[in-house]
Amino acid sequence: MKQKKILFLGESYRADAITWMNGLKKFGNFEIITWELKKPSNTFINRVLRILEYTTAIFKIKKIIKQQKPDMVIAERTTSYGFLAALCGVKPVAIAQQGRTDLWPDNSILLPLKKVIQNYAFKKATLIHAWGPVMTISMKEANVDMQKVLILSKGIDLEAFFYNPTSVNANKINAIVTRSLLPEYRHEIILKAFAILNQQRIDFVLTIVGDGPETNNLKNLAKKLNIDNKVIFKGRILNTALPQLLQDADFYISMPTTEGVSASLFEAMATYCYPIVTNLPGNSSWIDHRKNGQLITLDDPQMLADELIWAFMNEDYRKNALVENRKFVEKNADYRNNMKIIANLYHDLINQRKYN
């Protein structure tokens, strides 16, 4: 049987995209062709240039389609690449809403245009991915045909993200943060919370994985708070090194201002690392406060410190929660099971198009 081709529109270097594409290759035997915008969006000038590049992108995509003749097009983000996928003329088209709404930031002057673009993409898509239930809220508000929506996470590799039930540390708080060092992930709130613990003479070690534009600011803040001797900035690491770091820690902390479906949270739950996260719909879909983790009010370092102490002092509760979390990800976030479902559905959609 001839191998089927998929054209992927999106940032192919992102971990989320790599997980998606690799799963389709492994479990669907698809050949993946990629296209993405070349201009970065790190400065105002670059953002303007990126918008200009976007206006001519459809012509480049159609040229690739003519040359490669893909059987299907998939795209991430309903307000950008998803719109281009809807315009390209290939069926079937699957688009993924990456965030809670994809209409971000809330104060963008382009928001009305983004809504129009998103509605068009929703209407023209053959399949719409909601990686978690939180994403369906905005879809329903936009009157999306929910029969086209697949609510299923891509999942994580449970063989890589292993666990060891005996790893709970009773002597000190051993915590890890694995989100990029960007302003929206609020690492400064985490540092301030641990400064409160330090003032109360509670022993800890905090490991921060990843890099980003906030790196120097955060290192300086750790020094200012007199906790730099207990905070380890690991920088960017290989993905293969992450499971062991999570395994070695007892607490996973993530304090973003917005959240869709976090693979990082699933990875922590799989590796017996107790999650303490921002109280956002994207997190409360998976975490019940003081049942299998804890939910923290946005930008509240005192609450984070208090809840860390509570979890640390309630060791038996924490052990039970960790066992339940592993069971949860095995049932709901197994990469092998979920990506097989997605790959098989893509094959069905392609075959339906050919035989209709």
Image: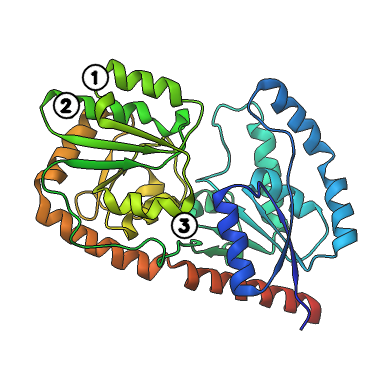
In the depicted structure, whether residue 328 falls above or below residue 29? above
Marker disc for residue 132 = 3
Where the C terminus falls, by quadrant? bottom right
Quadrant of residue 205 in the image? top left
The residue singled out by tag 2 in the image is 198
Give the amino acid type for the residue marked by disc 1 in the picture: Asn
Foreground: 353 or 180? Answer: 180
Element under disc 1: loop
CB atoms at circles 1 and 2 under 8 Å apart? yes
Tag 3: Cα neighbours inside 10 Å, few (<14), some, or many (≥20)?
many
Above/below status of 160 relative to 350: above
Residue 278 visible in the current orientation: no
Residue 226 has which mark? 1
**Residue 303 relative to residue 46: left or right:** left
| Front disc: 2 or 3 | 2
**Picture residue at 29% right of the left edge, 27% below the top:** 191
Is mark 2 in CB contact (under 8 Å) with mark 3? no
SS at badge 2:
helix
In the image, what residue type sits under mark 3? Answer: Gly
